[in-house]
Structures are given as structure tokens and as C-alpha cells.
Image (cartoon, rainbow, N blue to C red):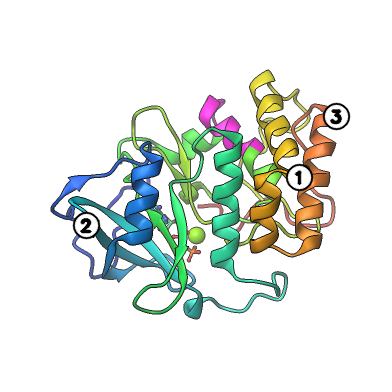
């Protein structure tokens, strides 16, 4: 079963590229500049989204791209994530992704927009020929990295549709609003490595996060975006993985697979 890009096409959006020099998600500095300073044009609302998730064009200084804009004003209150905003959690996930160094999350910023402050994330067009169900069950290295990343951020919503493979071997992930709970709530479709040894590159990435949280820039930034308990719980999750050196097992008292999984 393949989820085509048409299935995900935004309601009312044209999906056409904005005129201007395209900015790649790999060019992180240029993408962050564009997302922070660019003029946002709302093109449509994403049909499958549960919150107000808007598909936009963005332009700045000759550069252009499409992006997702999630205004804080459009967030539904969630009993299990009462503090802060989902937009801040999305940005916190991006900060962790940057520290890990795998480019798991497309460039993401927090900024003002036509419906007030929110998160703005570069749009990554998934290759419609890639079977996402098969990818989610595979032993693909990029997906394995995502499983480690999700364990760090305590992702409570890693669905198959949150995998974005542009077709160049890389796999991006989206929708990191319900992450960083202080309780262990990892809920994901990517359990195939549970209990398996972490790879040397995963241990290195975890070391970088641990260092960043021990008085480094990551700790400072996360303290602006999350509660002290959530930052401390992130530090403990990372320490635990570094101690046991395995991919975590599912929580016992929490549904381990998101529903629907797609
Ligand atoms: N940065 C992105 N690039 C490409 N597609 C995206 C991006 N962010 C979201 N999407 C698409 O939009 C859908 C809805 O966005 P999502 O972040 O999951 O919103 P919600 O929080 O409402 O579930 C995703 O399942 C995905 O298909
Ligand atoms: Mg979603």
C-alpha cells in the first residue's frame, strides 16, 4: 500500500512550487533564514491534519519554498500535554535533531505568521513511488536513526504518514507536537529494533545530546521551549540509553502503536 502525495495534497492548495530559487532542506542555514524572515502565503489547510496545519508558500531574498505553518491559536488542548505549546515542542524536536546531526527533522522555526505565532517547517515532498508501509517495517538505516531520535524526544505519535522520504535515500520525519512528555510515552510504528544494540553512530549522537544537555546550548534552548521536568526527563532517557546501549522496549502501561498507524 502506497500513500501517494496526492492523498496528502493540501485542501485548496495548488502544490505548485513558488517562483524563486528553491531552498533545499539540506541547506540548513539558508532554509532557517528563509523560514524566519520570509513572507508567508497561506495556500490551504492540510486535509489529514488534526490541528490547524496550513500549507504555505514562503519567499525571501530570491529564495522560495513551500512550508507548513501551525499557528498556536489552532492547537486543540490536550490533557496529556497541558504545558507549553505543540509548536514549541516541534521546535524542540528540531533542536534535538540538529544536535544529533542526522537531519531527521526538516528545518523548523518559531515565528509570527498571519494567524499569530506558531511553528513553520520546510515542506519536504515525499517520493510517491516509495511504499511507506514497507519503509516503516524495513531495516533502513535512516528509519533506524529516526527510531533513536524518537526515543530521545519520547515521540507519542510516530505514524507511517509522518515519514517523508524525498527519494534520495534520506528520510525526514514530521509532526513532533506530542513529544517530550516527562512520562515514558513512546508510541511508534518503528519497534523493529527494540532491545537490539544501538549502533556506534547512535551512541555518538546520544553522546552529543548528553553533552548538549549538560550545560551546553541544547539544554539552554530546550529550557526555553519545555518545562524543567521535561528537559530533565530527556536527559534521563538519553543517559539510560547510553547506559544500556540498546533501543528501548515499548512502555507497559501505554499503547505502543499509534492509532490509526497510517
Ligand atoms: N514538513 C512537511 N513536509 C511534507 N509534508 C508534511 C510536512 N509536515 C506535515 N506534512 C504532511 O501533512 C500531514 C499533516 O501534518 P501533521 O504535522 O501530521 O499535522 P497534525 O499535527 O495535525 O497531525 C502529515 O501527515 C504529512 O503528510
Ligand atoms: Mg499528524
Please state the horizontal and vertical placement of residue 188, each as a whole percent of the image: 64, 47
Front residue of 117/135: it is: 117
Identify the image quadrant of residue 80. bottom right
Query: Depth-wise, is mark 2 or mark 1 nearer the camera?
Result: 1
Q: Residue, x 37% and y 73% (percent of image)? A: 113
Q: Is residue 164 left or right of residue 216?
A: left
Label 2 secondary element: loop
Give how far apart the Cα atoms at labels 3 and 2 are.
45 Å
Q: Residue, x 77% and y 40% (percent of image)? A: 238
Q: Residue, x 81% and y 52% (percent of image)? A: 233
Label 1 secondary element: loop
Disc 3 residue lies near ligand 2 with CB under 8 A: no
Q: Is residue 93 left or right of residue 240?
A: left
Q: Which quarter is ligand 1 in?
A: bottom left
Q: Which residues are magenta?
A: 138-148
Dominant SS type (magenta): helix
Query: Depth-wise, is mark 3 or mark 1 nearer the camera?
Result: 1
Please state the horizontal and vertical placement of residue 76, each as a whole percent of the image: 56, 78
Earlier sequence position, callout 2 versus callout 1: 2
Q: Is residue 76 left or right of residue 193?
A: left
Please state the horizontal and vertical placement of residue 50, each as a whole percent of the image: 49, 70
State the residue position of label 2.
15
Rendered image: mark on residue 215: 1
Rendered image: mark on residue 194: none
Q: Residue, x 15% and y 50% (percent of image)? A: 20
Label 3 secondary element: helix
Please state the horizontal and vertical placement of residue 26, each as a whole percent of the image: 38, 36
State the residue position of label 3.
244
Please say if the residues under marks 2 and 1 sit with CB atoms less than 8 Å apart: no
Amino acid at each position: 500500500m502506497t500513500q501517494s502525495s496526492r492523498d496528502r495534497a493540501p485542501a485548496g492548495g495548488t502544490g505548485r512550487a513558488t517562483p524563486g530559487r528553491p531552498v533545499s532542506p539540506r541547506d540548513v542555514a539558508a532554509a532557517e533564514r528563509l523560514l524566519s524572515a520570509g513572507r508567508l502565503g497561506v495556500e490551504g489547510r492540510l486535509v489529514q491534519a488534526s490541528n490547524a496545519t496550513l500549507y504555505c508558500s514562503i519567499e525571501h531574498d530570491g529564495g522560495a519554498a513551500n512550508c507548513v505553518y501551525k499557528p498556536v491559536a489552532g492547537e486543540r488542548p490536550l490533557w496529556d500535554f497541558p504545558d507549553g505549546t505543540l509548536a514549541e515542542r516541534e521546535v524542540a524536536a528540531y533542536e534535538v535533531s540538529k544536535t544529533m546531526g542526522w537531519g531527521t527533522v526538516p528545518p523548523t522555526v518559531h515565528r509570527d505568521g498571519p494567524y499569530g505565532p506558531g511553528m513553520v517547517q520546510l515542506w519536504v515532498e515525499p517520493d510517491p513511488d516509495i511504499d511507506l508501509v514497507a519503509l516503516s517495517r524495513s531495516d533502513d538505516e535512516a528509519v533506524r536513526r529516526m527510531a533513536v531520535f524518537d526515543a530521545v524526544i519520547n515521540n507519542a505519535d510516530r505514524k507511517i504518514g509522518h515519514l517523508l522520504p524525498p527519494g534520495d535515500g534520506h528520510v525526514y520525519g514530521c509532526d513532533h507536537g506530542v513529544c517530550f512528555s516527562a512520562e515514558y510515552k513512546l508510541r511508534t510504528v518503528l519497534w523493529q529494533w527494540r532491545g537490539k544494540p544501538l549502533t556506534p553512530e547512535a551512541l555518538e549522537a546520544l553522546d552529543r545530546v548528553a553533552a548538549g544537555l549538560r550545560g551546553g546550548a541544547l539544554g539552554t534552548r530546550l529550557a526555553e521551549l519545555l518545562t524543567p521536568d521535561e528537559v530533565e526527563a530527556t536527559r534521563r532517557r538519553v543517559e539510560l540509553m547510553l547506559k544500556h546501549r540498546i533501543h528501548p522496549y515499548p512502555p507497559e502501561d501505554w499503547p505502543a502503536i499509534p492509532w490509526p498507524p497510517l
